[in-house]
Image: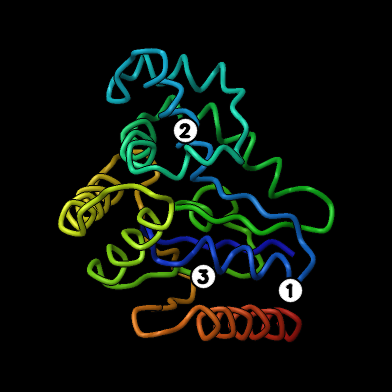
């Protein structure tokens, strides 16, 4: 079974995807970390994430561990949003993501174009969202918890800017797949969000079995 979980930054899609992976005993890939790793590689090399050439070179040479805590920083998030807009970068990372999705038994992937580009044939598709203010508050709390000195207003500004870039880009823009189920987590706890996601996937599975 392949489960696609898409949505904007800090919507809760990563937490939900991990929970679904545990529940169904499936491997999980946070595809956003691939782009964060590329973005950080560009910055560490002294390049410009907005440069197609710099970003493509980093993507081709990508060797960063996806468990690096630095990938969760706001700088990594901004760089990821910039490098992900380059079609050539997305093409380099496309096969890696599709290979993960196509492994025997299935997988859970979360990102912004899983249900539309990476795994349009996914058995279940969720589009997780929340208000910009709620997402900013969540991300702010996460960053403060990491010991970073950040202001909520700056995080909200960054969230809105990334939403605009991700939705307006020409290459695989952020959008809800036609056959995805929307899950708004604005007023839900983590436990409620996960329970709702499991119910959605279970319901899609029953629907597919009856087709």
Closer to the chain start, of discs 1 and 2, is: 1
Q: Nearer the viewer, residue 11 or 154?
A: 154
Residue 85: give x, y in percent of width and height.
33, 35
Q: Which mark is residue 90?
A: 2
Q: Real-space Cα distance between discs 1 and 2?
A: 30 Å
Residue at 22 percent of width and 49 percent of height: 158
**x%, y% of residue 45?**
41, 13
In the image, farthest residue toward the right: 104
Q: Residue, x 45% and y 37% (percent of image)?
A: 36
Return the residue nearer the eye: 16 or 178. 16
Please provide percent x and percent y for residue 165.
25, 45
Q: Which residue is mark 3?
A: 126
Distance between the alpha carbons at the discs numbered 3 and 2: 21 Å
Figure quadrant of residue 74: top left
Q: Is residue 48 left or right of residue 1?
A: left
Quarter of the image with the C terminus is bottom right
Q: Answer yes or no: do the residues labelled 1 and 2 have beta carbons within 8 Å?
A: no
Q: Quick one: label 3 or label 1, which is nearer the N terminus?
A: 1
Establish if 192 lies above or below 73.
Answer: below
- Which of the 4 quarters of the picture holds residue 53? top left
Q: Determine the CA span between mark 3 and mark 1.
A: 16 Å
Residue assigned mark 1: 23
Residue 46 image point, x, y percent: 34, 13
Q: Could you say whether the residue bearing mark 3 is in a helix, strand or loop?
A: strand
Circle 2: element type:
helix
Classify mark 1: helix, strand or loop.
Answer: helix
């Amino acid at each position: 079974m392949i489960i696609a979980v898409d949505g904007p930054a800090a919507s809760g899609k990563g937490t939900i995807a991990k929970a679904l992976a545990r529940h169904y005993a499936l491997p999980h890939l946070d595809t956003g970390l691939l782009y964060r790793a590329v973005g950080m590689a560009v910055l560490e090399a002294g390049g410009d994430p907005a440069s197609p050439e710099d970003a493509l070179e980093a993507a081709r040479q990508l060797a960063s561990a996806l468990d690096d805590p630095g990938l969760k920083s706001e700088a990594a998030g901004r760089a990821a949003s910039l490098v992900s807009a380059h079609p050539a970068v997305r093409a380099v990372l496309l096969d890696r993501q599709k290979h993960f999705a196509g492994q025997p038994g299935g997988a859970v992937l979360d990102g912004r174009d899983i249900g539309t580009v990476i795994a349009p044939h996914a058995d279940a598709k969720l589009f997780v969202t929340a208000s910009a203010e709620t997402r900013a508050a969540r991300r702010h709390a996460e960053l403060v918890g990491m010991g970073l000195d950040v202001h909520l207003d700056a995080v909200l500004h960054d969230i809105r800017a990334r939403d605009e870039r991700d939705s307006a880009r020409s290459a695989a823009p952020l959008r809800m797949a036609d056959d995805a189920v929307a899950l708004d987590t604005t007023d839900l706890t983590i436990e409620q969000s996960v329970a709702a996601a499991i119910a959605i996937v279970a319901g899609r599975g029953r629907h597919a079995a009856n087709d």
